[in-house]
């Protein structure tokens, strides 16, 4: 019995927690999220991208073949499992592989290159801390089907524009590097391995493993001694030959033409195996964190690693939404609250309800966020609710007000009260509320033929009142 009790308590205490490293997104944080999605949608749409969503679950092999078995994402952070039919699956740690899979199966016939963007949840079994979660979201984009250095520069330009427009202008550094082509990288890796061969005593367990599986990852080492040695190690830059050198030079030339500031970092390698040629990262320039706001690069070899017969050139980037949100929150960027209730209507008695219902709809149609308190709660309870909602105005329609076609209008911010005729209330509020807060979205605007569905026109308040009076 005792054991059962403990299990029972444990079961219920964990059931109400979110899984470590995963968070609910609501309230103010959700407003920042919506803002980011809007900025991304606007920027990508303007540049000819269309949105794609790929499944959250993919075959594990897609991930291992793309990110590489030696990457942290695969070796330490993958959420993988067998389904009921014993298929080996994984929660996606990133979207590039899934987007390439979708491109290869659905989009080869489209006019090339294909421009795609996504706003998706991803999963990595990372050590949770600020800016590092086990479920996080990325805004990302891929251009697949053409190899031109101008595309790499354009991608970085788009990313910078997004960072600038959300309030991070001057707050980040764009770091770039080139990893050359496969042959050049192979030669470089041999020399890098040779360089560290007689310095193994300096390497810890993790770095020793890196030396064995993929010496390129040593460039990511956090060990200060290794970082010191790297100053004297061979540099990828000097292994770039002919076309690769020219490609990288052109990327830089286009960045300059586009006015994108960057710094070159010859130790920048990125944590995924599919990159070749250009790689980049946007890092927090304030030095508050080592974490990157985002990163990307060219991955011309990925299609072949996934079994496609030819190499399909591609370039893309991903930005961490949570890091962007926390970055702008930390810098005091405040957003307009579009969820604010402008008008809260309190009604007392049936006569008032009859007037309040159409009044509420008229206010909503005019762009106000208007709520009505229904049922029979006391005025005190209704006022409490209005306060909790942070309503800007409260209109009280009591029995006498209903008879006279008026309301008592309270300005909750100023604490003032005045008598207003019901048919003048909506125009009055429209003149007082910040126009930018009004919401005029109508699903009809999204139909090709606007006439498909038309809601019944709202009867003007004064006509309703006339009818009521006749009753
Ligand atoms: P990545 O550098 O692994 O690249 O991730 C991109 C961004 O996602 C990071 O810079 C960071 O802002 C965010 N991020 C990564 N892990 C976490 C985490 N545990 N918690 C919070 N944010 C995180 C990619 O994923 C590539 N697919 C980008 C790409 C697209 N390359 C070409 N196309």
Image: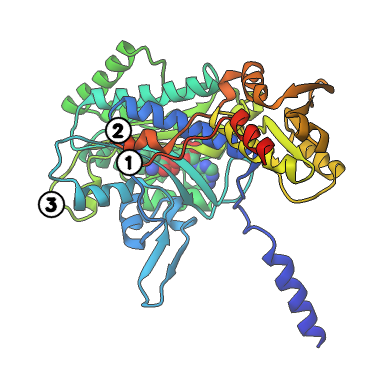
**Separation of marks 1 and 3 at Cα, in angstroms:** 47 Å
Q: Earlier in the sequence, mark 1 or mark 3?
A: 3
Tell me which residue sits at (47%, 61%) in the image: 79
The color scheme shown is rainbow
Q: Residue furthest right?
A: 380
Residue at disc 1, secondary structure: helix
Residue neighbourhood size for the residue with mark 2, other residues' Cα within 10 Å, grouped as few (<14), some (14–19), many (≥20): some
Residue 174 horizontal side relative to residue 327, left or right: left
Residue at disc 2, secondary structure: loop
- Residue that mark 2 sits on: 49
User: Which part of the image, by quadrant, shows the C terminus?
Assistant: top right
Q: Position of residue 446 (x, y in %)?
A: 36, 36
Tell me which residue sits at (38%, 16%) in the image: 260
Can see residue 152?
Answer: yes
- Residue that mark 1 sits on: 452
Residue at disc 3, secondary structure: loop
Tell me which residue sits at (74%, 42%) in the image: 351
User: Mark 2–mark 3 contact, CB under 8 Å?
Assistant: no
Above or below, comparing residue 22 to residue 238 in the picture: below
**Separation of marks 2 and 3 at Cα, in angstroms:** 26 Å
Tell which tag, 1 or 2, sits nearer the viewer: 1
Residue 407, quarter of picture = top right
Q: Which mark is on residue 309?
A: 3
Q: Earlier in the sequence, mark 1 or mark 2?
A: 2
Q: Earlier in the sequence, mark 2 or mark 3?
A: 2
Can see residue 28?
Answer: no
User: Which part of the image, by quadrant, shows the N terminus?
Assistant: bottom right
Q: Which quadrant of the picture is home to ligand 1?
A: top left
Above or below, comparing residue 433 to residue 465 in the picture: above
Q: Position of residue 172 (x, y in %)?
A: 52, 22
Mark 3 C-beta to ligand 1 under 8 Å: no
Q: Position of residue 133 (x, y in %)?
A: 57, 48
């Amino acid at each position: 019995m005792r054991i059962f009790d403990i299990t029972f308590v444990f079961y219920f205490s964990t059931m109400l927690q979110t899984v470590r490293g995963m968070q609910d997104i609501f309230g103010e944080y959700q407003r920042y999220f919506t803002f980011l999605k809007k900025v991304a949608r606007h920027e990508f749409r303007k540049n000819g991208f269309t949105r794609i969503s790929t499944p959250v679950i993919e075959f594990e092999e897609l991930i291992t073949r793309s990110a590489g078995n030696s990457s942290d994402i695969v070796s330490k952070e993958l959420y993988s499992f067998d389904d009921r039919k014993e298929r080996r699956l994984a929660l996606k740690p990133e979207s590039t592989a899934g987007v390439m899979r979708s491109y290869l199966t659905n989009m080869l016939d489209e006019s090339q290159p294909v421009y795609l963007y996504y706003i998706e949840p991803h999963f990595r079994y990372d050590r949770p801390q600020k800016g590092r979660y086990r479920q996080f979201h990325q805004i990302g984009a891929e251009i697949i089907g053409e190899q031109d250095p101008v595309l790499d520069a354009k991608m970085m330009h788009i990313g910078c524009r997004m960072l600038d427009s959300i309030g991070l202008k001057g707050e980040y550094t764009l770091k770039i590097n080139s990893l050359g082509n496969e042959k050049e990288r192979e030669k470089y890796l041999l020399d890098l391995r040779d360089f560290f061969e007689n310095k193994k005593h300096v390497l810890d367990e993790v770095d020793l493993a890196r030396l064995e599986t993929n010496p390129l990852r040593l460039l990511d080492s956090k060990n200060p001694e290794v970082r010191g040695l790297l100053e004297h190690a061979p540099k990828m830059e000097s292994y770039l030959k002919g076309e690769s050198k020219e490609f990288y030079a052109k990327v830089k030339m286009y960045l300059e033409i586009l006015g994108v500031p960057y710094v070159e970092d010859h130790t920048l390698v990125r944590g995924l195996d599919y990159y070749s040629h250009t790689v980049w990262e946007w890092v927090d320039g304030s030095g508050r964190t080592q974490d990157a706001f985002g990163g990307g690069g060219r991955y011309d070899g990925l299609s072949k690693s996934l079994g496609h017969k030819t190499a399909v050139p591609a370039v893309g980037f991903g930005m961490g939404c949570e890091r962007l949100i926390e970055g702008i929150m930390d810098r005091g960027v405040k957003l307009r609250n579009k969820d604010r209730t402008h008008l809260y209507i309190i009604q007392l008695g049936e006569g008032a309800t009859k007037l309040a219902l159409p009044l509420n709809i008229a206010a909503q149609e005019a762009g106000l966020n208007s709520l009505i308190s229904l049922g029979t709660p006391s005025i005190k309870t209704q006022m409490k609710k209005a306060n909790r909602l942070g309503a800007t105005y409260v209109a009280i329609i009591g029995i006498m007000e209903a008879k006279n076609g008026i309301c008592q209008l309270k300005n909750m911010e100023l604490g003032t009260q005045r008598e207003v005729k019901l048919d003048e209330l909506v125009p009055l509020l429209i003149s007082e509320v910040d126009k930018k807060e009004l919401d005029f979205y109508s699903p009809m605007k999204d139909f090709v033929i606007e006439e498909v569905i038309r809601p019944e026109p709202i009867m003007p308040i004064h006509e309703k009142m006339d009818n009521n009076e006749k009753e």
